[in-house]
Amino acid sequence: MIIAVASPPGAGKTHWICQQIAKTNKPVAYFSPKTDSLPIDTIYLQSEYPQLKIYQTGEEAALLAGSDKAMTYIEIPWYLDLSGIEPLLTRLNSYRVAIISPDANNTEFVTWADEVVSGNQITKLTTSLQIHRGVLKGEILDFDSLATFWLEMTQGAYGEVVRAKGMFDLEDGQIYYGDFMPNQPELEFEPLNLPRWLDGRPTRKSGFEIVGNKLDQAEIAQTIKDCCVPESAISYYQQQLKESLATEPEVELV
Amino acid sequence: MKIAVISCIHGNYPALEAVLLDIDQQKASKIYCLGDLVGYGPHPNAVVEQIRSLDIPTVQGCWDEDIVEGLNACDCSYPSLLAEKRGKIAHEWTNKEVHPEVREYLAQLPHTYKEDNLCFVHGSPSSNHEYLLPEMDAFTALERVLSSDADVLFCGHTHVPYVRTLDSGQLQVKVNQPNKDEQPAISFNTPLKRIINVGSVGEPRHGRPNATYVVYDTETDAVSLREVEYDYQKTCAAILDAGLPPIFAWRLARGLEFAEKADDPTHVCER
């Protein structure tokens, strides 16, 4: 079965999919179209559920072929036009679930959906939303700097923010996930369940996505740059970490 | 006698003006200043000129020291790479802006100032970069006050005001040396001591933009932590006009300070 999931930004698509995966012990697959350059939700889900089968753009035929063996979720980013993706959904004969917010204009989603699920309350903006995606290319950030930037960003220092999420490689070799929605309890940055990267600049994908209004993109980019560990310090940090991990005593649970 | 103790003005002249007015209303007989007259804020010269003109006994803060000696502190000065980048921008701007006589004044400021049983420092008697945080362990805190040879130690630097009373107690010291007979323990009683952090006039870190300082009564030992409203928007506008990073104004308006305290409160700068 293929289930397509759509919602306004921040209403809780990924969270709902997570809940469905947690409920089943059958094989599950996932595809999020047009997010290949920065697949934040994909990587998050993969770290939570390593057995999850991931499809990328161009693998739609394989997705269709595999859908009789696995429950397949298609997470439709809010910025994709539903009518634009309609031919694909029709071809895949997908069931449609809309996650709606009590405060948003849900008419389009309700009309589109086979099933409507109540989601998060989201901030209503009178102006149109803007999205700023920052794709990082191997940058390693300093945790305290990132925490400062994230606090400033979510409190409006770089424009009004209604949704933000990001994945950042930090100096301890782990990749951290951050998620922000106004009116929701703030989540601490947490390391994803992925291997530490301790050999030079990471080649895996990382970056952030900020949705809001009047976003100062240049200032955001500069601040992120100022959070980065300089080239000269990366190998030093990594060497220190390797040594400390090698000497860490094993803990035996009795 | 009532005295007023101010600290960490950080080039914020409107905040200093408001605090001086409040001190006048509190009828304090004397004012002391714990340094960091400059750095981050847009009015370093005006602040120093005002402090000088009022002949306020002042100790040197870490920012004052950096303007005189250059940035040569160890890593402890900044808690993050982002804070370091911003701190350097503020340092370079201030360094270009200060008049020669202001630099000369900052250069001759002492690290500690003592009057009767009161001692005035910026960070701690050990270093003007050290943070005497309220949660610092009592033994270390007591050692810092004892080393100042005072009963009341006034400090700033953390930008968050507090009063800490270290009750009198008994300490026992015993030194064990290898290959030597056991040494006798030495016991002594410590008198009651206090640490008073006076907060920050120009760069608060308590979640509101208001300036803070302390009024202390030398006869009754009463401490009053004062929080003074001022036109912080004026300072924010001056930050933008001066070409300083807009984030400085944003943080000032929210009482977030420009940079955060060091992670390790007991770390002493190795400069």
Image (spheres, rainbow, N blue to C red):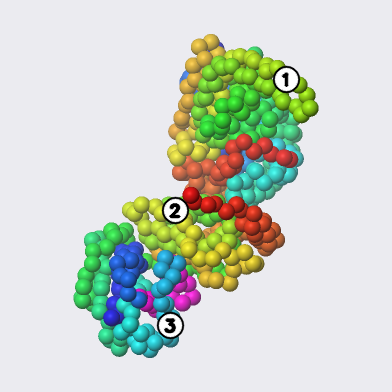
Q: Which residue is mark 2?
A: A188
Chain letter for mark 1, please: B
Quote the CA–CA distance across marks 2 and 3. 31 Å
- For residue A220, side relative to residue A72 (left or right): right
Q: Residue B205: horizontal and vertical position, in percent?
A: 50, 39
Determine if marks 2 and 3 fall on one subunit: yes
| Any part of residue B119 in sight | no
Q: Which residue is mark 1?
A: B183
Q: Residue at x 62, y 57 (%)?
A: A245
Image quadrant of residue B124? top right
Label at residue B218: none
Image quadrant of residue B9? top right
User: Identity of the amino acid at label 3?
Assistant: Thr
Q: Residue at x 68, y 62 (%)?
A: A235
Q: Is residue A38 magenta?
A: yes
Chain letter for mark 2, please: A
Q: Residue A207: horizontal and vertical position, in percent?
A: 50, 66
The residue closer to the viewer here, B180 or A193, is B180
Residues drawn in magenta: A28-45
Q: The residue tagged with tag 3: helix, strand or loop?
A: loop
The residue closer to the viewer here, B232 or A50, is A50
Q: How busy is the neighbourhood of tag 2: few (under 14 within 10 Å), some, or many (20 plus)?
A: few
Q: Residue at x 46, y 30 (%)?
A: B228
